């Protein structure tokens, strides 16, 4: 039963690609202010679940509520405007634009009705100030004039977070933000994520870097073959035999 203290919840959420059940009857309840880790082996359905929540994919079945409203079937820009921000597993900045311009492109609107509207926003001093503030928020104030494509991957991931913050999300979905980072960079990213939570943003993060996820998350949900196989505090989930089995690859599809 989902209590009232829930920011996002899903019921029976499913996405099939032909015969493949990428997300299979997932019931998820996210509490305001938590950092929730979503883990699971490759192909478990983690990114697909993010794509469903952010409206990039339509569910095959099931429902999604965000702040009490049903959002499944809404367009991505509508869901973004309601307060769901996200980053992508494969970072995709506008490669020829600077870091500042990349953030500017995200400031103001989740969707521009015309190129002219976009260009006008782009030049507005208030938007410029806001974009600089967002770069500073993620520690990229030194890199505003640098072409996005030349930034190291860790900084491109921070740029993605700045772009996601441009629409003042209430819920932020981070897809493998720590991938490819060395220990010290990952620790700095964890500090940034904690500070975002302290600002009132609820976070769901998909992660393969276990020490990072276990040290940062309040709660972990484990997916395997599209289904939730475990959830709980990090120390509990880590020792769950089903989880260990899923990661070792011994679990057969469809087994309990
Ligand atoms: N658009 C698509 N069309 C067909 N199959 C897809 C599509 N997107 C994902 N899949 C399949 O759905 C399953 C879940 O993929 P998903 O990307 O959600 O996994 P993941 O948990 O994010 O994996 P990883 O940890 O490798 O990123 C995989 O078998 C994948 O091949
Ligand atoms: Mg993925």
Image: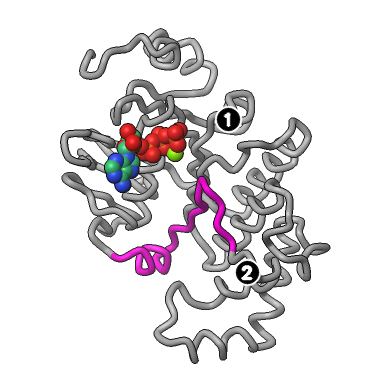
Which residue position holds label 1?
213
Query: Residue 18's mark?
Result: none
Q: Residue furthest right?
A: 142
Question: Measuring 27% from the left and 13% from the top, which residue is drawn there?
Answer: 252
Residue range highlighted in magenta: 75-93
The part of the image, by quadrant, that contains residue 58 is bottom left
The quadrant the N terminus occupies is top left
- 83 within the magenta span: yes
Whether residue 12 is visible: yes
Which residue position holds label 2?
103
User: How far apart are the alpha carbons under marks 1 and 2?
Assistant: 27 Å
Instruction: Out of 169 and 149, give the one closest to the viewer.
Output: 149
67 w.r.t. 119: above or below: above
Residue 148 left/right relative to 86: right
Query: Can you give x and y, in whole percent of width and height, for residue 110 in the image?
Result: 45, 72
Query: Can you give x and y, in whole percent of width and height, for residue 41 in the image?
Result: 43, 25
- 19 within the magenta span: no
Indicate which disc, 1 or 2, sits on the residue closer to the N terminus: 2
């Amino acid at each position: 039963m989902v209590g009232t203290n829930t920011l996002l919840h899903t019921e029976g959420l499913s996405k099939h690609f032909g015969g493949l059940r990428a997300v299979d009857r997932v019931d998820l309840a996210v509490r305001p202010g938590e950092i929730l880790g979503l883990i699971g082996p490759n192909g478990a359905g983690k990114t697909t679940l993010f794509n469903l929540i952010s409206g990039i994919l339509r569910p095959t079945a099931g429902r999604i509520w965000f702040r009490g409203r049903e959002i499944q079937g809404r367009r991505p820009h509508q869901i973004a405007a309601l307060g769901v921000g996200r980053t992508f597993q494969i970072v995709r900045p506008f490669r020829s634009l600077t870091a500042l311009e990349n953030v500017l492109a995200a400031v103001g609107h989740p969707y521009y009705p015309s190129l002219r509207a976009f260009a006008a926003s782009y030049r507005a001093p208030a938007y410029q100030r806001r974009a600089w503030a967002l770069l500073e928020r993620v520690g990229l104030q030194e890199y505003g004039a640098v072409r996005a494509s030349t930034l190291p991957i860790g900084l491109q991931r921070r740029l993605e977070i700045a772009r996601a913050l441009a629409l003042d999300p209430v819920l932020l979905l981070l897809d493998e933000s720590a991938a490819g980072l060395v220990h010290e960079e990952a620790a700095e990213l964890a500090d940034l994520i904690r500070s975002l939570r302290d600002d009132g943003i609820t976070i769901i993060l998909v992660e393969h870097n276990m020490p990072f996820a276990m040290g940062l998350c309040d709660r972990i949900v484990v997916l395997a073959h599209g289904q939730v196989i475990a959830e709980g505090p990090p120390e509990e989930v880590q020792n769950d035999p089903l989880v260990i089995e899923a990661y070792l690859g011994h679990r057969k599809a469809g087994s309990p």
